[in-house]
Image: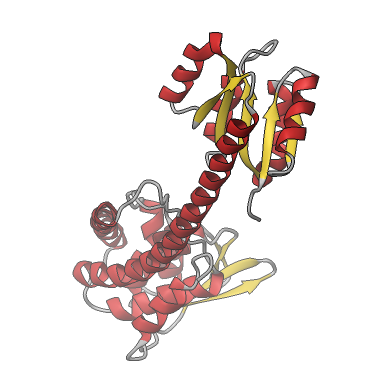
Amino acid sequence: MKPTKILYVDDEAMALKYFERLVGPLAPVLTAGSVEEGRAMLRDHGDEIAVLVCDQRMPGERGNELLRHAREYYPGIVRMLTTAYSELGEAIEAINTGEIYRYINKPWELDSLRADLRNALELADLRGERDDLLRDKLLAQQSQLLGNRLAALLMVGAAVHGEGAEPALYCFAQTALAVGFEAPALDWNHWDHADLLQAEARRGASIAVQLRLWLERFGPRREGAEALSALAQAVGGEVRGDGVRLSDVAPLTALLSAPAGTAASEAQCGWLAWLLWQGGGARVELVDGAWLLQPASAEAPPTDWLADAMERVGGQAPGG
């Protein structure tokens, strides 16, 4: 929903009524009589508010404290301060610290007030369009990041343990798609393309280190009860009959869904290490509300499995 409303905060009841009457033809107006009421109004209607106008001098907390709160928790709202001439220094300070877009002198001049608010509404609309574009960029990056991570895992797996790497990654991808996972957290205000590539390269290096440590711990390949015990250790599950019971699928998917910029941990790499160690043989099914992993014969992956898996894991991103 596109925000269209103006919130005006002032402790003077007449000022609230006068503002609403003057500005109502321009946009819907919400009012509050204190900073505390203003916070409550933001909490309840923040997604509807395009512009926040706040008086500076009020009993208790001052207006710039509400504007600071809005900047932190509702950054898309255009913030404005209305002050008397004697408080001009405080308004300038609020502008310099990024708390407000501009200030409006009291007493108001009708045409100037409406012009300022019209400009603020247009700015709010532009910010909304910018945020939508950045959000679309984020979704595309998340989708691409998931596919790239899967391809990178195949390269790292082959480098660390060449024999059986492709069947292992095929099983890894099919398992992740079967149990479901979240797309990696990606702050579109923080990452540019080069920084993201660098962070992912370093993450790949940390995965290689952890995989080697796991494979050294496993030692020569074993089967039966020993392989099952190693699987339970790798994923943090509990041996149940001929399988390992998992109440949390994070160990199976963390190498795909971990936030950008984080190094891979030992726990995140255990499942893939086990698959490499066993040559890719495992199956997963939902039993009594929990996931059951069982060792199985490795499947020969189809020729185009990686391209298909990259497209399907990319679809796990929101909007993908």
Image position of 314 with respect to 270: above or below: below
Query: Looking at the image, can residue 211 be seen?
Result: yes
The residue furthest top is 86
Q: Residue at x 62, y 36 (%)?
A: 114
Image position of 267 with respect to 221: above or below: above
Q: Residue at x 70, y 69 (%)?
A: 288
Q: Is residue 72 left or right of residue 32?
A: left
Q: Residue at x 68, y 44 (%)?
A: 26
Q: Residue at x 52, y 39 (%)?
A: 75
Q: How many marks?
A: 0
Q: Is residue 304 left or right of residue 205?
A: right
Image position of 282 with respect to 109: above or below: below
Front residue of this view, candidates 164 and 158: 158
Q: Is residue 27 left or right of residue 209?
A: right
Front residue of this view, candidates 219 and 197: 197
In percent of width and height, residue 222 lies at 34, 72
Q: How is the image coloured?
A: secondary structure
In percent of width and height, residue 97 lies at 43, 23
The residue furthest bottom is 303
Front residue of this view, candidates 114 and 307: 114
In percent of width and height, residue 252 lies at 46, 64
Query: Looking at the image, can residue 280 be seen?
Result: no
Instruction: Give the quadrant of the N terminus.
Output: bottom right
Q: Is residue 198 left or right of residue 9?
A: left
In percent of width and height, residue 116 lies at 56, 35
